[in-house]
Image (spheres, rainbow, N blue to C red):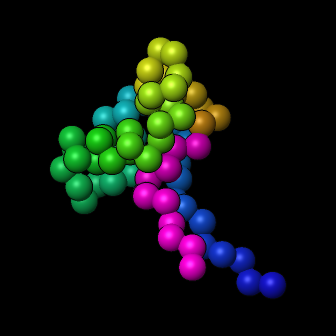
Amino acid sequence: MELSRQRRFVTPAPEETIEDLAARALPDQPLQAAVDSIKSWNLHVFAMRRPPGLMLGSDVIFVEPPLAHG
């Protein structure tokens, strides 16, 4: 059985901000664009968590959009 490709993700480093994570995970993108993309791909952290944007070391933070399965 062949394994399917999975979405790329990272876990936050201690004390890492979303800006730090975006710069590390998406270095080829402008910082604000990278932050906005990561926020949109991780609503479980940036829209639903209280306080919004609190990242934990155990979080899975997706650094690419959902993959199309066909």
- Membership of 54 in magenta stretch: no
Say whether residue 24 is left or right of residue 2. Answer: left
Residue furthest top as drawn: 51
Residue furthest front as drawn: 70
Q: Which residues are magenta?
A: 60-70
Q: Quadrant of residue 65?
A: bottom left
Is residue 24 among the parts visible in the rendering?
no
Above or below, comparing residue 34 to residue 43 in the picture? below
Q: How many marks?
A: 0
Q: Residue drawn 51% across and 26% down?
A: 48
Residue furthest bottom as drawn: 1
Say whether residue 8 is left or right of residue 5. Answer: left
Q: Residue drawn 33% across and 54% down?
A: 26
Q: x%, y% of residue 42?
A: 47, 41
Question: Which quadrant is home to the N terminus?
Answer: bottom right
Say whether residue 29 is left or right of residue 48. Answer: left
Q: x%, y% of residue 32?
A: 21, 41
Question: Which quadrant is home to the C terminus?
Answer: bottom right
Quick one: 8 or 52, which is closer to the camera? 52
Q: Residue drawn 47% across and 15% down?
A: 51
Q: x%, y% of residue 30?
A: 18, 50
Q: Residue drawn 44% across and 30% down?
A: 46
Say whether residue 32 is left or right of residue 26. Answer: left
Above or below, comparing residue 28 to residue 59 in the picture? below
